[in-house]
Image: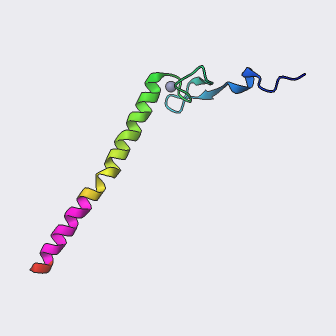
Amino acid sequence: MKNKNSPELNSRLVKCPKCGKDSLYSTENPYRPFCSERCRLIDLGDWASENYRVASLPDSSSEEEFSEDEEKNN
Ligand SMILES: [Zn+2]
């Protein structure tokens, strides 16, 4: 009989996307694919600030619309 779900196959070493160190990619590592909580938080912080910049764009475009309307009145 063969064990189909070998736990060794479910965990492997990957490079941490943040610092490049070896990190355990398995259910034992809650921060996977990152090596630690710190790296995961840094990456989430980067993503959140990028997202914030994109989300603020619609505000400035509605301002443009307003000034365009002003020009027509001129
Ligand atoms: Zn790391």
Query: What residue lies at 81% left-to-right and 27% top-to-bottom?
Result: 4
Q: Position of residue 44 (x, y in %)?
A: 42, 34
Left or right of residue 72: residue 49: right
Q: Residue furthest right?
A: 1
Left or right of residue 62: residue 9: right
Q: Position of residue 35 (x, y in %)?
A: 53, 23
Query: What residue lies at 23% left-to-right and 63% top-to-bottom?
Result: 62
Quarter location, residue 60: bottom left
Q: Name the main secondary structure of what is drawn in magenta.
A: helix
Q: Position of residue 56 (x, y in %)?
A: 28, 51
Q: How many marks?
A: 0
Query: What residue lies at 30% left-to-right and 56% top-to-bottom?
Result: 57
The quadrant in which the C terminus is found is: bottom left
Vertical arrangement, residue 3 with respect to residue 54, above or below: above
Quarter location, residue 49: top left
The quadrant in which the N terminus is found is: top right
Q: Nearer the viewer, residue 3 or 9?
A: 3
Query: What residue lies at 32% left-to-right and 48% top-to-bottom?
Result: 53
Bounds of the magenta span? 60-71
Question: Magenta includes 52?
Answer: no
